Every structure is written in structure tokens, then in C-alpha cells.
Image (cartoon, rainbow, N blue to C red):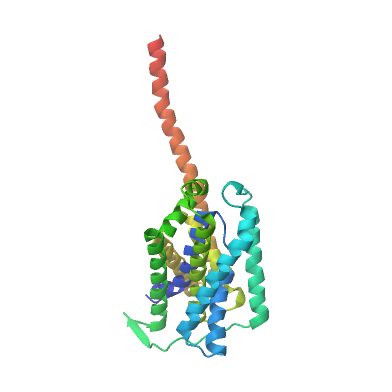
Amino acid sequence: LEIVIQAFYTGAEWALIAVGFGFIARTTNIFHLALGALFSVGGYSVYLLSVRNGLPIPLGIVVGAVLAGLIGSVIDRFIYQPVTGLYGQRKVNHLAPFVTSLGILIVIQNVIQVWFGASPLYVQPPNLGVTEIGQSRVLTWNLLKAAISLAACGLFAFWLSRTRTGASAVALGQSAEGASVVGVSETSVRFQIFFATGVLAGLGGGLAILSHPTLPGDGFPIVLYGALISLIMPKAGIMTWWLASVGAAFIYAQSIASIGGGWQDTILQSVLMGAVVVSRILIPWIQRRAKLRASVVTVAPAMADGKQAGG
């Protein structure tokens, strides 16, 4: 039970990046690894505003998330769009935006490290007491963190399903050229979706630094987990990605409890990579083979009937 509870509040941090990464990949075909840097921006903003300047922690979380969202939109407008192009000018080289995103991640994390140092930083969370669940005792703040993450992803899903921008973003992911025909402004839609996903990543960083010591480079492994989770199920819904992140965190926590010794990252990465291979390579190969056999079974009797009729 303790491992399950830990998986929920740890996976809640990862889910915010997994949802953002998966949606950006679905709509723009960009592997937005810079979300890992925005995760760090959100966390260190909370530290800067709350610890060094004495502002209330909730205000620090909100400001950090909004700042991460704005940086995400700026990254897309002035870095990604010149690399990828828009509509008819869209460029087909998918490696360029990937390398660009990785470079942005490295630069922002290095800037944070130069500014704040390489030591882990931590912000004392609100004292909300302890909650008993069965025979386990868990900090109420950790439960609240999971609830905040779930609510944020729920609001993001509601925004996508109930607003014109959300519908335009989905249409953009299906066909950028088709979306342009019906009057969708790709520049405007991309600004909003990069802002929204940046807010999610920044919120994840703000929740993380209130739960455990955080390093400037912590965003990289988390965005890696989020990327693999979203690649396993590229067409999944927001809540499915959230639950998948909790499942990945369960594997992580179970590895610590069972093996320990720092093997948890290797185990989780191996499991996620194996799942990506199965879902993106093995299963499609099996489906193609099944369709080929079905077509052979269907065509062979028809050819035999044709020969008999000809005879």
C-alpha cells in the first residue's frame, strides 16, 4: 500500500510532463524535450520567490508555472517555427527540431545551475499534517500534490474538448494543411498549446521542489520518462497518460523497495523502452502479418473460382 501511495504522488509530477510532451508530439510532431527545462524553471521559481523573497508558496507556484508557459511559447515562436516552418512551407526534417529541443534543454538547465548553483534545493511545503490510509501514514501535502496534478490535467482535457482552440489544436494534429483551409491560425494555436503545456511542466517542477530536494538537471530524466510513456500510447487520452505515469512510478518505487542500489532508473527505462518496442514495432508487425494472411485466404478462393469459371 505504501508503494502504491508513493506511486500516485510521484507519478503526479511525471504525468504533467507526459501529458504535455504527448500532446505537443501529436499536434506538431516535435519532441519537446525542453519541457524538462521548464520543469526546472517552475521549481526554481518557487524557490526564488518563496525562500529568497518571502512570497507565499501558492503565489510562487502560480508565477513559476506561468513563467514556464511563457518561455514555452517563446521557444516555439522564435526557435521551433523557423526550424519546422508552417503550413505549405513546413520542412520535413524531424531531426532538426529534436536536436534543437535537446539543445534548449541543456542551455536552460546550465543557466539555472550557474544562477543557483549545483547543490539540490528544497522548499518546505505547507504543514498539513499526516493522513492515515489503512496501515500507512502519508503526508497530506503529498496527497494534495496528486490531487492538484490530476485537477490540472483534467482542466487541460476540458480545455481541449470544450474550446475552439482545443478543437483547432486537434485539427492541427490531424492535418496542418487541412486546418489552414478552414481558417485555423497555426501560429495562434501553437502559442496557446505551448503555453498550456509549459504551465503543466512548470507546475510539476513547483510541486516537486516542495516534496524533495531538486537539482537543475532533474528535468531531463523526468522528460525522458514522460516521452517514453507518451510514445507507448501516442493516441491515448489525457487521463490515460496520467494513469500510465502513476504505473511507471509504481515500477520505480517497487524497484527501490525490492532491489535498491540505484538500479531503479535502469529498470524503469528498460521497461518503458521495451513497452515502446512492443507497441510501436512488434504489435504493428503482427497486425500487418495478420492482414497479409487474411488477404491471402480471401484472394486464393476467388482466384480458384475464376479459373473454374474460365474453364
- Residue 137's spot in the image, x, y percent? 37, 83
Question: Which residue is more in the foreground, 176 or 2?
Answer: 176
At a point 65% along the width and 59% down the height, the residue shown is 99
Q: Which quadrant holds residue 143?
A: bottom left
Q: x and y percent of residue 92 in the render?
A: 62, 48
* Location of residue 241 by image quarter: bottom left
Q: Which residue lies furthest to the bottom in this view?
A: 54
Direction front: furthest residue: 183
Q: Residue at x 46, y 34 (%)?
A: 292
- Considering the image in quadrants, where does the C terminus appear? top left
Which residue is found at the position 38% from the left and 67% from the top? 154
Q: Is residue 209 left or right of residue 81?
A: left
- Residue 228 in view in this figure: no
Furthest residue to the left? 134
Residue 89: x, y in percent?
A: 61, 48
Would you place residue 75 above or below residue 136 in this image? above
Q: Residue at the location (46% across, 73% down)?
A: 10
Q: In this view, does 104 lie above or below 181?
A: below
Residue 266 sits in quarter: bottom right
Q: Quadrant of the image for the N terminus?
A: bottom left
Q: Where in the figure is residue 97, as x and y percent of width and height?
A: 62, 57
Would you place residue 62 above or below residue 264 in this image? below
Q: How many labels does the image show?
A: 0
Residue 285 appears in the rendering: yes
